[in-house]
Amino acid sequence: MPWVVRDTVDENNRAVGRRWQGLDRLLPPRAELPEGCAAPFVATGGNGRPAGLAACCHEHVKSGTLNQTWGTADRFSLVVRLREADTAAALDDLMGQWRDHLAGLPGTGADDTAAMITWPARDVSGVTTLLRHGLQPITVIAVRPARPGTAAPQPGGDAGPRPAGGESLVIREAGPADLDVVTEFEMGVIRYDALFGAAILRPVTEELVRAEIQAALAVRPARAWLAERDGEPVGLVHVQPPEESRWITGMSRSGVTVYLQTMFVRPGDRGGGVGEALVRHLHAVLDARGVDTTLLHFAQLNPLSAPFWSRMGYRPLWTGWEVRPAASLR
Ligand SMILES: CC(C)(COP(=O)(O)OP(=O)(O)OC[C@H]1O[C@@H](n2cnc3c(N)ncnc32)[C@H](O)[C@@H]1OP(=O)(O)O)[C@@H](O)C(=O)NCCC(=O)NCCS
């Protein structure tokens, strides 16, 4: 990128960071514009200064990787950095340039492709423009800032406060002997998320999930907990530690951040407080471990997620918008 353009990018990033802080304190303090596949798209501003910039990033996700379960094989993402409060006109301008760019690329009409934008959930000024260009809201990144002062759980499987879980419910760390049931519960979430377009089941998904879980269950401190009723597992919560959550921590404020990767309660055991007991237990553990921020994804159309996570102290931070195939962007 020539130095003049880099100056423009840096200045725009600072302005966008300031605007984000005004919109939502849990967004990152500084916006970054990554290197795209070509020079950034520029949105023309009213006073001769760009109203914003955007970079198109191409990602080919190899088959045989778990990442292919979380989206299409080829992903064309527009990273948008707009500095004015009303984003509608500038976003429309950038999306028009992006649409023409994607239309000229080979392969963007193939089934396993998507055009994607991750947009700040509280930046409502852009929503109608995203819809008009054919994008759909598929996923939500939700955030929970830690509540200081929560007591640590007692050793020996104490579940902490259990307002609805009942006396017979025990929460305990999952270990290597739980591989089968943890894999079954992880696959339960993936199958459920696939109903809403937030996951894509691949022939190798289960095998890859099993291998990932085998490794995760072997390490300490624990990162997965099971809820058991009468000795039988009925629910699971699984979190990635800070060092493995770095792929997403840049989406929020700085501090110790973890990613909650799985929350699942067996269908026949839902609505009885198992999920709440698991999450309360997890929050007590995370608070004791000094975690400042917890992030998670849920499918926008999952009817169980939004009310559950809201009650548990989470709220939308970003929305993942997509259209498949990529060339069907309007
Ligand atoms: C989301 C999920 C984990 C919640 O688990 P759960 O054990 O049903 O959660 P809870 O029972 O604590 O709370 C769920 C609902 O039951 C209600 N509930 C809680 N205790 C209850 C009780 N004793 N009797 C009846 N209802 C009760 C809650 O009010 C809550 O309702 P609301 O969310 O509409 O306000 C579970 O539905 C699930 O596994 N869904 C499929 C996978 C999934 O969506 N995972 C999350 C992906 S991000």
Image (cartoon, rainbow, N blue to C red):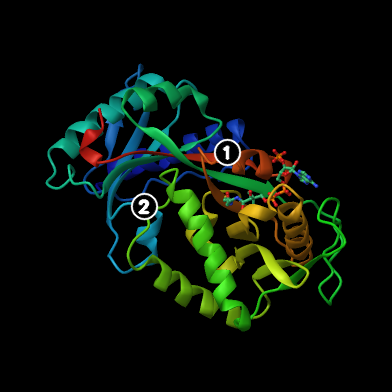
Q: Residues within 10 Å of mark 1 (few under 14, many from 20)?
A: few
Picture quarter with the C terminus: top left
Residue named by callout 2: 71
**6 or 174, which lies in front?**
174
Residue 233 shows in this picture: yes
**270 or 57, which lies in front?**
270
Q: What's the residue at 62%, 43% (across, down)?
A: 26
Amino acid bearing label 2: Gly
Amino acid bearing label 1: Pro
**77 or 283, which lies in front?**
283
* Residue 104, quarter of the rendered image: top left
* Residue 105, quarter of the rendered image: top left
Residue named by callout 1: 303
89 is higher (above) or lower (below) than 214 = above
Residue 219 shows in this picture: no
Q: What's the residue at 77%, 61% (across, down)?
A: 281
The mark lying in front, picked from 1 and 2, is 1
Mark 1 to mark 2 CA distance (whole Å): 20 Å
For label 2, being within 8 Å of ligand 1 is answered: no
The image position of residue 24, as x and y in percent, is 61, 35
